[in-house]
Image: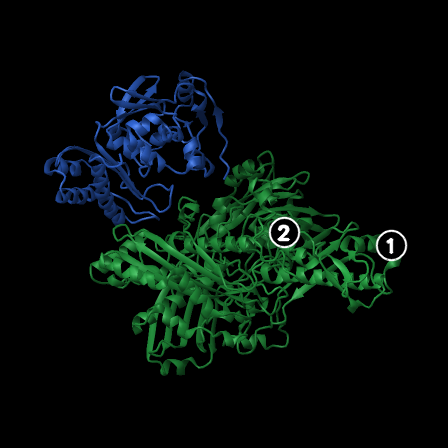
Amino acid sequence: MTSRWIGRPLPRVEDARLLTGRGTFVDDLPPPPGLHHAAIVRSPYAHARILGYDVRAALAMEGVVGVVTGEDVARSTRPFSVGVTTPVQYYCAATDKARFVGEPVAVVVARDRYLAEDAAERVVVHYEPLPAVVDPERALEPDAPILHEAVGSNLASHRRLVYGDPDRAFAEADVVIRERFRFPKYSSTPIETYGVIARWDPLEGVLTVWSNFMGPFIMHPLTARALGLPENRLRFIVPPDIGGSFGIKTSLYPYIALIGLAAMKTGVPVKWIEDRREHLLASSSGTDRVAERELAARKDGTILGMRIRWLDNVGGYIRSPEPGCSFRPLGNYVGPYRVQHLEVEAAAVMTNKSLTGPNRGYACGHLYFETERMVDLLAERLGLDPAEVRRRNLIRPEQFPYRTPTGGLYDSGDYPAAFEKALELARYDELRREQARARAEGRAFGIGLAVAVDPSVSNMGYVATALDPQFRAKPEYLPKSGAVDACTVKVDPLGRVTAVLATTPQGQGHQTIVSQILADELGIDPREVTVVDEMDTFTRVWSISSGTYSSRFGSVGTSAVALAARKLRAKLLAYGAHLLEVPVDAVEFRDGAVRRRDGAGPILTLKDLAGRAHWHTQSLPEGMEPGLEATAVFGFRVADAVDAGDRVNSSNTYGFIAEVMAVEVDLDTAAIRIVKYVSVHDAGTIINPLIARGQIYGGALHGLGGALYEELLYDESGQCLTATFMDYLVPTACEAPVIDIAHVESPSPLTPLGSKGLGESSSMTVPAVIANAVSDALAPLGVRITELPMTPSRLWSLIRRARAGGGSPAGAGP
Amino acid sequence: MKPPPFEYHAPASLEEALALLVRYGGEAKLLAGGQSLVPLLNFRLLRPAALVDLNRIPGLAYIREEDGRLVLGAMTRQRAIEFSDVVRRRLPLLHAATRLVGHLPIRTRGTIGGSLAHADPAAEYPALLTALEGEVVAVSPRGRRVLAAAELFRTYLTTSLGTDEILVEVRLPLPPPGAGWAFEEFSRRHGDFAIVAVAAVVEREGARCRRARLAAAGAGPVPVRLREAEAILERDGLGEDALRAAAARAAELVEPDSDVHASAEYRRHLTAVLTERALRRALARADGGDG
């Protein structure tokens, strides 16, 4: 196959409609007849017992058709399954207690949203306020308020994982570095908020839900069970466009249950579009984390072992797929380093904050912030250049495929080559000279480095690491594994190609990518391909792991497309050979036609074959199915279940990121200016460099948000202080640095095209690289960054304290 | 985020608008550009019985030079100010400050009168009015009155305008030709309200300072005129020591609060930093720099 289209920076076919405001999002769908609107009554308390409801005043308003309260939720639904054995009862709305500010406690259904909000104000909920706890360490103290009495403490899960012989590694080390880090709770704030429309058909017993659901499709059976519906009576329909997610919309499913329940109770179709305040208060975010790290090394910089203690704050309930925050990166805990000995103590704690879930990079931003800071601290301790310390520890190219001590299988890569490329692009040595000059002038100029393994396509089996091996060893335990996607390619009677997917894209450009792949596979023009990517669980091929999350499409989705095309091509070859009356190995498929390898005789174009196959089935060889379409379901064979030693290949393809950033800190205002930023990625074969570039920019901006701007802040009583975009600051185009982007391509041996995922990309490295750069800039003052975000106010406090001659760099205040 | 029910009126004259304010007896809110009011309504933090929309009243948007002052109609859009020739020529400080007001779509709707009446102490215009010793004109059924900046701003989001009063005009005295000026702002992102901003105007006479004007935004419940810092310059001249002393004094004159964006200490510190920077830049312009 020749690559005429793969690798080209084709502009996205989606852009015309998206940029002119003509996309079809959930809010644009034609309203079902009789549509009503929901407003959600939310808890004003972080922690309170619910004593009762009085909905009479709301129901008395003209145009209000019903109110659903926690009593209805408790009576008519079941708690969602959670990923741990701890007895946490998580319903789609509060039943006994409210456990965070903004938790749904009731739903009002009315003629329009204005009226619904007016009526929501008249719903009286009787609360008994309880003491709240928001700090994860405080939550584990014996006298802390308990959120879930049945659990008995606020600890949702706790696992100690040991790989290799960390005790020996630490005993044999020349140096041991210890540091404590705090990572902030932040989100990705997609431009489109959550949206759900639910219609209950009591005659067929079918609940149809239109929403911006993005998967993982495990949440479909999970929701069906919560609502007490058979899975084939719960229909999820997803419109062609979703306005971004970055993982945040994986946590939409409780609202599907809640609005679904409202539709079933009131008998009218119900629509709910989340507003921005609701989104910031109560949708989802990454965890805030306290991490204690130890690193053992030889004095030449060789890292021997790591000890990790994580305390992840999952908020009021541990909502599935948490505690993925601890285990999603399991296979790449060691990152790109050869270290073999590792101890990880991972705890998830529940506090009176909003709930957490996957957020771009799913805790890899946390992981690499800590690890890469530790590597810089090691370099500082040993008096070595931080680039040199990394060089000495990177996995060598000849070691691929590389099995990590935690079970990860790194499929391909050349980490030193990508790292050197980043240093060279940044002119690292010149930057160091510039730094020397700046320091001589009293300016704070710093250079940061970060390297990371970029995992894509989660193996859903990783979630079971949250369970004890003894539990997993029970005969009744059913292991989980897999990462699957499907595609159907159809050729119509005139030879035009349509691809049907079920990948719920959120702006990633799947239509463009699919048309590029099919153009190469079938020798056609990408503009001739129609790509249909609207999900409908009643009609599409899907499985538990379907959806667009975990950077899946570039790896698993594209593989399904290529395989479907190849299946179709095999059929075209067999059919063509039959028509040409030669053996199948005498023909080939080239430039969109079946032709004899020896060049003789007529050729049969796709159009020729399609016409005959549809119009004249008699022409098909014996045993060949009529019609011209192929469906492929691609599944990775390396996605095994977690083993007894807690090893699991938690992703399927693994890319690599190497970054260099230079910053200058204004010592008077503590403002950080990015002087240079180089980002080198290895995501295997790049199908569309323009889309790859967009992903890297977007990922970097999300990382920059967490590093400098964004934090969901709560006061001691659990009130959220950042429920508007005036207080929760998201970097905009004005804050975007120029990024020098380059690629190294080490094709994956596991995917037909050699591609890997790239969707989370620099979101996982920017917190590390900028924290390293700022620490380097402020090194003469002795300031070391251990906490994000580095707001000017916080950074100035650190600078002032350092100048005053002391104090550890613990962050405090806003 | 839908507003509670309210009556909506779009009067065609000031008299009609004033009559409506009287009719609602303090329960009506005036709608100018809506850039602050509408979010407050949608958050249901405000529940007025009625909105009186000023956008259909003719004659409230103008920019004129008059008796050594720049006179602006209250409904003049920030975008119009940004692109006004007379503003750029005669009061470049106003031009510079306007560029820092929100983002383009905000400035396209937002008005100078609305910003002053909203009285966010971190906003640019209240600080500017304070630094320039400007005035606003308000009308009510009781008549017309002129308020100085110091009389207008009471505390956070609160002015001394009565509930039956409409701010109709803003008057900004023009500094003499050759005066240096600067508007130094520190915000976390482009277009945000200032963490702290300092407006400065300096009239120099050799090494002497004939007159200095300094005001800070974001450094307390109202914009702060830094009179004692000005006095240091007017007394001690424009040397290095005087600049630093004035900046240090400025930090002592403000009473900032802490919020999610910055601590009070940091804001106090920034007041000194930005005062010094503003003075240096103003001096450079007074010397014939890029004014």
Residue A684: tell me if it is visible. Answer: yes
Label the green chain with its letter.
A
**Amino acid type shown at disc 1:** His
Q: Position of residue A107 (x, y in %)?
A: 56, 45
From the top left corner, tell me how far across and down residue A311 is, in percent: 42, 66
Residue linked to disc 1: A616
- Residue A542 appears in the picture as rendered: no
The N terminus of chain A sits in image quarter: bottom right
- Front-most of residues B208 and A404: B208
> SS class of the residue under badge 1?
loop
Q: Where A625 sits versus A200, above or below?
A: below
For chain B, give the colour.
Answer: blue
Residue A446 % position (x, y): 32, 60
Q: Quadrant of residue A165?
A: bottom left
A385 is higher (above) or lower (below) than B200: below
Q: Are marks 2 and 1 in contact (CB under 8 Å)?
A: no
Return the mark for residue B181. Answer: none
Q: Residue tagged by mark 2?
A: A511
Q: Earlier in the sequence, mark 2 or mark 1?
A: 2
Q: Residue at x 66, y 64 (%)?
A: A634
Quarter occupied by residue B286: top left
Considering the numbered disc 2 on the image, is that residue within a helix, a strand or a loop? helix
B178 or A182: nearer the viewer: B178
Does residue A459 appear left or right of residue B104 in this picture? right
| Residue A260 on image: x %, y % | 63, 49
Who is closer to the viewer here, B100 or A158?
B100
Dot 1: chain letter: A
